[in-house]
Amino acid sequence: MKAARAAITGVLIAWAFVVEPGPPADAGGQVRMPPNPEDLRLQKALQHSPDLLVRNLGLSATGFVAFTVVNQGHVAAATPFVADVFVNELRRDTIKFDPLRPAGSQAVQSALARAPDCKPVQITVVVDAQNVVSEASETNNVASRQVVPPCPDLVATISMDRMNNNLQYKAKVTVSNRGTLASGPFIVHLDWAQVGGFGLPGQARFDVGPLAPGQSYSFHELDKHLASTRMEYRVIVDFYNNVPESDESNNTTRARLGGL
């Protein structure tokens, strides 16, 4: 009886370690998965038909939709066709294309479809929107993605510009565009007051811009102060909110200078 049980146990253990054969491996030991029937069908169809798709979908440096249309088929797209361009699901442009040779591509930038502000937007392109080209696959004509458009971001700093052997100073204001798009012209507001309530407060406004990305512009207040005079300053960039920005919370800067 014990011998019979041992024999049965040995059979069960041996059965437990039987491994079903998996997909074959290549010479490098990498497992080769069986080909996808749909991929095989497409590769065969590409030998006899054009196939249009969209690549490199994004925004230009000025915020307009840009993309590349590719014919990955081995046959030319022999008739002209169009691509519809959408921003937030609204069609903003229809672009015409000439016939496209096999393995050919054409990069374009829309002149009408532009991201409207500094918030994320969904951009979509439908190539051969009128279905005039008979293609190897009609399921890859749409490309879509969410993007953040290029935008200005205006900030200011206030520093002390010493003069007359450090006996006097002026406030120096530097305005910079830290964004990814040039700004239009804007107004910078500067006001000041002596700490402790002495003297009269003042204010001035300056025309600045346009500023390219990374560009700065500096100016000084009109009056000089003794180095011992403690002054408080406030700068408001884009005082009238004429410039859409990626960050509207960093337009105000304050600083105290002098009195040292």
Image (cartoon, rainbow, N blue to C red):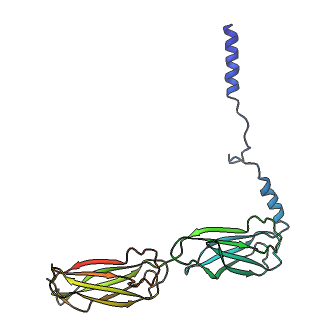
Q: Position of residue 161 (x, y in %)?
A: 24, 85
Residue 135, compared with residue 2, is above or below; it is: below
Q: Position of residue 102 (x, y in %)?
A: 79, 73
> In the rendered image, which quarter contains the N terminus?
top right
Name the residue at 28% across, 81% down.
234
In the displayed structure image, the side of residue 236 where residue 143 appears, left or right: right
**Residue placed most toward the observer, 145 or 23:** 145
**Residue placed most toward the observer, 201 or 112:** 201
Instruction: Give the number of marks.
Output: 0
Residue 111, compared with residue 88, is above or below; it is: below
Residue 146, compared with residue 41, is above or below; it is: below
Q: Position of residue 236 (x, y in %)?
A: 34, 81
Q: Quadrant of residue 99?
A: bottom right
Q: Position of residue 2 (x, y in %)?
A: 66, 8
Name the residue at 71% across, 81% down.
95
Q: Residue furthest right?
A: 48
> In the rendered image, which quarter contains the C terminus?
bottom left
In the displayed structure image, the side of residue 156 where residue 115 appears, left or right: right
**Residue placed most toward the observer, 109 or 33:** 109
Q: Residue furthest top?
A: 1
In the displayed structure image, the side of residue 30 where residue 99 appears, left or right: right
Name the residue at 68% across, 9% down.
3
